[in-house]
Amino acid sequence: MIRDLFFSFKKFSNFIFLVSFLCPLSNLDLVKSESLKKSNLVNTQINSNYLNSKNELQDYIIDKGDNLFIEFSPAEDLSDFYSVNEEGEVYLPRLKETYVSGLTTSELEKLLEQKYVDYLISPKINVKIAIFRGINITVAGEVRYPGIYKFLPFQSSSIENFLKVYKNNINNPLEEEYGQNLPEVQISNETSSNQNQLLIEDKKIDRNNPFINYLEKVKDGNITKISDVIRKAGGITSSSDLKRIQIIRNIPIGKGGGKKSALVNLDTFFDDAGNPNDIRLFDGDHIYIPALNNSNKAQVPKSILSGLSPRFVKINVFGRVNTPGEFMIPLEGTLSDALDITGPVKPLSGKVVLIRYNRDGSISKKKIAYSANAPRGSRGNPYLKEGDLITVTSSVFGKTADVIKEITAPLQGIYFTKELIEDFGE
């Protein structure tokens, strides 16, 4: 019997060893640094943390331009929308101007609960972002146009719930003026306690409440993801390494401050535009896309089809062409494509001049010995970029003809005037 138990234990220990060996070999598309929280599924059960919505907002740093919905208990009448001004402050009942910039919502909740102990019995405060401020994202590396890109503010998806709570406040001074524009809900008949009445009377109502005057302006904004920034930066190049995208983000002061970093694999975006690794970005994030050791020209057409890169770029053509002006050409279009669209080059034309903004912000001016038969991407037929200015100059003979024309133009005018007078005299 002991022998049977021994072999049974031996088989079980082998099974445990096999499981422990195979678990680390599971592939993770999203590789995070130690400073980022990791979550894994245990067996076939869904981790309970999955039910905690918006975990990504735990480290969201409040700053000027944010609009908060602060819910008070037991003083529900104080629940309101509060905007963070240019000084990073919100105006709160009794507390007046309160500096909140740099805090997370949970940190602000704890701070306010401590400060309102003198005015409320066992205060419970809940802080949510009602309108997210516009964000600035820096992108560098292998994108077509590195730089800082701005994205619009946008409403929280829970805005309707905030509106219902807001309207249900019994002493809401905005009810009479704006009630017709708010969701129809039953007004509460509850009365406030005596302990909270002083705060209610002291409540300052902002007549320029962002909920009333700003809400309509942020309907076009959306959550900003990695793909949105790449798209706005002109898309990827054939040298973009999408498997090693680095995201650098600020750490809240309450958690030590500084920066944290993550590596994200977005390579499968071509096959799945809903890639879970296409994570949400926040104000101040930095994106760096490294270069491949060997360029991959096949990924540019894929990026166009998946929407990661634009289909067309805008350029301007002037000079000795049939139809000068602003034109759209395909991404990675060449000089020959542009001149095909503008019509044939006029006779007596000379070299082509290409004016372009460089990645470092400088402006380059390059003369090109254009040849329609030159290979695509060569010196005689280079690839064009968004915003390029192209001028087809006159040749030496063309310039001479222009000079002769300028000189003879007044003489022609005199001759025709003389003929007109003589004809009139007859």
Image (cartoon, rainbow, N blue to C red):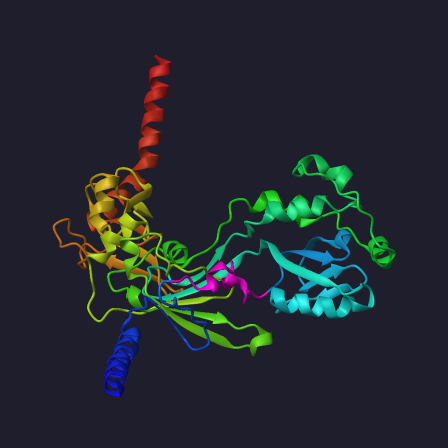
Given residues 18 and 321, the one toward you in this image is 18
In the rendered view, tell whether residue 419 sits above or below residue 122.
above
Q: Which residue appears at 49% of the width and 50% of the height?
A: 222
In the rendered view, tell whether residue 344 sits above or below residue 209.
above
Left or right, 12 with respect to 286, comes to: left
In the rendered view, tell whether residue 168 sits above or below residue 296.
above
Q: Residue furthest front?
A: 1
Residue span colored magenta: 45-61
Quarter where residue 423 is shown = top left
* Residue 288 shows in this picture: yes
The quadrant in which the C terminus is found is top left
Residue 358, horizontal then vertical, whole percent? 35, 63
Left or right, 301 with respect to 115, comes to: left
Q: Residue furthest top?
A: 426
Q: Is residue 59 magenta?
A: yes
Given residues 413 and 44, the one toward you in this image is 44
Left or right, 209 with respect to 337, comes to: right
* Residue 66 shows in this picture: no
Q: Which residue appears at 35% of the width and 66% of the height?
A: 43
